[in-house]
Image (cartoon, rainbow, N blue to C red):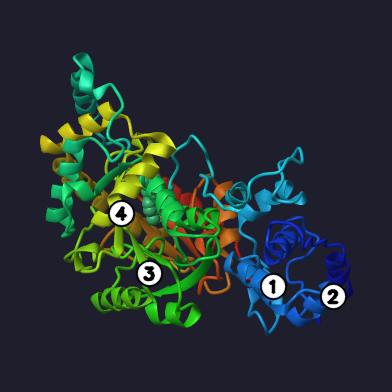
Amino acid sequence: MPNRSTFVTLASLVLDPSASIPLYRQLYSALRAAILAGRLKAGARLPATRALAAEFGISRNTVMNAYAQLLAEGYVEGEVGSGTYVARTLPDELLHARASATHAPQQTQAGRMLSRRGALLGEARVATPRFPGELKAFRPGVPALDAFPYELWARLVARRWRRPQRSLLGYGDPAGYRPLREAIATYLGEARAVRCEAEQVIVVAGSQQALDLTARLLLDEGDAAWIEDPGYLGARGAFLGAGATLVPVPVDGEGLDVAAGKARNPEARLIYVSPSHQYPYGVTMSLPRRLALLEWASRAGAWVLEDDYDSEYRYAGRPLAALQGLDSEGRVIYLGTFSKVLFPALRLGYMVVPPDLVAVFAAARALVDRHSPTLDQAALADFIADGHFARHIRRMRALYAERQAILVEATTHELAGALDVSPAEAGMHLVGWLREGVNDVDASRQAATHGVEAPPLSLYSLEPPRRGGLLLGYTAVAEKEIREGVRRLAKALRTLRPRA
Ligand SMILES: Cc1ncc(COP(=O)(O)O)c(C=O)c1O
C-alpha cells in the first residue's frame, strides 16, 4: 500500500484539463518533479492507477500512460498494474538535476514558458564527462588524441586555406561537399557493404545531428520508438525531444531482442540500433536477429536507424556487414561519424538515407544550420583521397588493440574478484562487471573520488541492468594512465560492499 505521505504529496498536484499539454504529460511532469525534489522518496509506492484516476477524476489510461513514461525513463520501477515504486537508484545525473526540477519543467527558472519541444529537450538526460576539460582514464568514446597526425592535418587544412577556391567560400550544398560525399560512399561500400550512391550521403555535424534530424522528420509526438536498453543517451534524448514514447527493448548476447520489442510495442514507428557494436554492452547483432528486425520493420512499416559509430575498430573476427546492406525496402537510415576516427571536435559525420528522403533531409539541414564548414569538409576529403584515413585507421586499430590488452591484463591482475573484465573483438571500451549486489552508481561515484572516470551501466539504462557494471574506455589515454587508472579503481572498489 502507498503510505499516507505519498497521498499527501500527490494531493497537492494540480492538473489543468484546459491546457494544451496532454493530461498524462502533466501528471508525468508533476510526478517526476516530486521525485527529483525528493518529495516522493526512493522506494515509495505510487498509488494504484485506478485509485489515482479516481482521486483526480481522470481516466485510468491517463495515469497508466504517465506511469509508463516514468518507468521508461527510469524514475520508477516495477510493473504498471502490479505495484509501481519510486526507483531506489536514481542515476547521478538525475540527482544533479534536482535543483532545477523544483519548478514545473515547462518553465524557465524565471517562470517563463517554454515550447513543448523545449520542455522535452530540457528534460532529456545528457551524458557529461565527470572531469570536464581533463582527459582521464577511462573516458569512453574518445579516440587517441595523443596519436592523431596533427602536422599532416594542419598541412591539408592550410593548403585549402592558402588559396581558397571562391566557390567554396559561399553557401554550400546542405547535403555536403560533393567530393566528400563521394569519398564516403566509396568507403562505406568497400568497408561496410553499405549500398548507396553519393547522392544518398548527407554530411552532418556529427551523428548527433543525424539523430536530431531523423527524430524531427520521421517522428510525431506520441509515436513509439524502440530503443536499445541500455542504450545511447544521444539517441534517447533526440527522440524524447521529438515527443516520442520510448520503448526500452532489452539487449542480449545477440543484440536487440526483437521478439521482446514486438511484445512490448508492435506498432513502433522507428527502431534505433547499434548492430556492429551495441552501445554500451558491445555485442554484435547476429545475422538471424538482423533479418528478424528487418522483417518486423517491413511488416510494421517502421524506420530503422542504424548507428555504426565505431565500426572501424574491430580487432578479431570478421566484421558483419552493415544492416543497411541487407535492406531491400529502403527502411534503414545509416549513421556514421568521424568523431571516433579523427576527433569529436571536428563535428563531421554522415548519414545515408533512402533516395526518396534525400531532398527532405537536405532541406531540413539547410534550415537548421545550412551546412557544415566547407573547407573542413574539403580537407577531410583530401585526407581520405590521399590514403591518410585508411592508414590512420590501421594505426589506431593496432594501438587500441594494444591498449585494450593492457587494460585487460591490468584489471585481471589488480581487480580480480571486484570487476570482471573480458577482452572484446571490437570497439573502444569494455564493460567491467561488478560483483552481484554492488551498485554501479555507487561504484562510479567512488571511482570519481579516486580521480577515475567510469560511467555506470545504469546511466544508460531505462530498466535496471541485470548486473551492475562500469564502462571502461581504453582508447583515449596511454599505457601509463591506464595502469594508474586501474590501480586507483582497485582502491576505490575495495571499500564497496554489496547492498543488502
Ligand atoms: C553510440 C554512439 N553513437 C554516436 C556517437 C558519436 O556522436 P557524434 O558523431 O555526434 O560525435 C557516439 C559517441 O560517443 C556514440 O557512443
- Among numbered discs 2 and 1, the one appearing first in the sequence: 2
Determine the CA span between mark 1 and mark 4.
35 Å
> Contact (CB < 8 A) between labels 3 and 2?
no
For the residue marked with disc 2, what is the amino acid?
A: Glu
Residue 62: give its label. 1
Position of 434 compared to 37: left or right? Answer: left
Q: Which residue is mark 4?
A: 357
Q: Nearer the viewer, residue 175 or 33?
A: 175
Determine the CA span between mark 3 and mark 1.
26 Å
- Among numbered discs 3 and 2, the one appearing first in the sequence: 2
- Among numbered discs 3 and 1, the one appearing first in the sequence: 1
Q: Secondary structure at mark 1?
A: helix
Q: Nearer the viewer, residue 479 or 162?
A: 162
Position of 347 compared to 177: left or right? Answer: right
**Residue 494 visible here:** no
Q: Nearer the viewer, residue 417 or 314?
A: 314
**Residue 278 visible here:** yes
Determine the CA span between mark 2 and mark 1.
13 Å
For the residue marked with disc 3, what is the amino acid?
A: Ala
For the residue marked with disc 4, what is the amino acid?
A: Leu
Q: Quadrant of the C terminus?
A: bottom right
- Depicted 195 relative to depicted 264: above or below: above
Quadrant assignment, res 192 = bottom left
